[in-house]
Amino acid sequence: MNKQLETKIKICGLSRSEDIDYVNEALPDFAGFVFYPKSHRYVSAEQASALIQKLDKRIKSVGVFVNITAQEIARTMQTTNLDIIQLHGDEDNRLIDEVKRLCPNLHEVWKAVRIKNEFDLSMLKTINHADRYLADAYAEGYGGQGKTFDPRLVMDIEREKLIIAGGLNKSNIKSTIETVFPYAVDLSSGVETNNVKDRNKIIQAVNAVKK
């Protein structure tokens, strides 16, 4: 397979030094850090900075933010030097543009799209300044909370811009990739045991995508 066309994988919600050891061993493409205080995976900018310093340089860091100002995101960026910003709330193009302006060293900005039982491409018109879209299952609050959705609902999104999240694990990653062939898949609860990152599950998930 053409290496440029292979689906990438993000492991999200890293919060402990051990989590960094696990991903450095497994080598996913992206490692996610959650800056949403209501999440049990929350880390402060200072905690994330220390973790990112240990992160293998081949893995890009992604910061997940929910409904805060571009200025607050920029302050976190100054401390952490994140590669990618993921906006997971109700943000629009205005905020996306402001984040890009205030954080010129960013590689990309991703915007989450919460999927219920249907999807229309016109839903993207207010967030189409994002570099990629992360399709996640709708749940009360923010984040998919381990719920899944039918990936065929988002097949009209350009493949290079599509990231699939929501209830993915080593058992259903392959079928999801074969169905929609997204740019990347994003796992969090699917590589945890009792709300804590699990080394074996991370390695198995990365291997399921890359081998």
Image: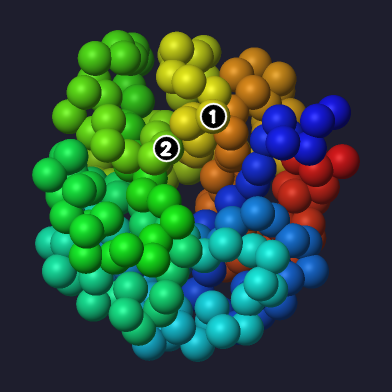
Label 2 sits on a secondary structure element that is strand
**As drawn, 48 above or below 204:** below
Q: Quadrant of the C terminus?
A: top right
Please tell me the numbered disc located at residue 66. Answer: none
What residue is disc 1 on? 160
| 138 sits to left or right of 150 | left
Mark 2 surroundings within 10 Å by alpha-carbon count, few (fewer than 14), some (14 through 19), many (20 or more): many
**Residue at horizontal 15%, vertical 69%?**
71
**Residue at horizontal 69%, vertical 65%?**
58
Q: Where does the image place residue 84, in percent across and percent down from the top left?
A: 43, 58
Mark 1 surroundings within 10 Å by alpha-carbon count, few (fewer than 14), some (14 through 19), many (20 or more): some
| 146 sits to left or right of 198 | left
What residue is disc 2 on? 132
Query: What's the amino acid at mark 2?
Result: Arg
> Looking at the image, is mark 2 or mark 1 earlier in the sequence?
2
Q: Where does the image place residue 99, in percent across and percent down from the top left?
A: 23, 57
**As drawn, 56 above or below 167:** below
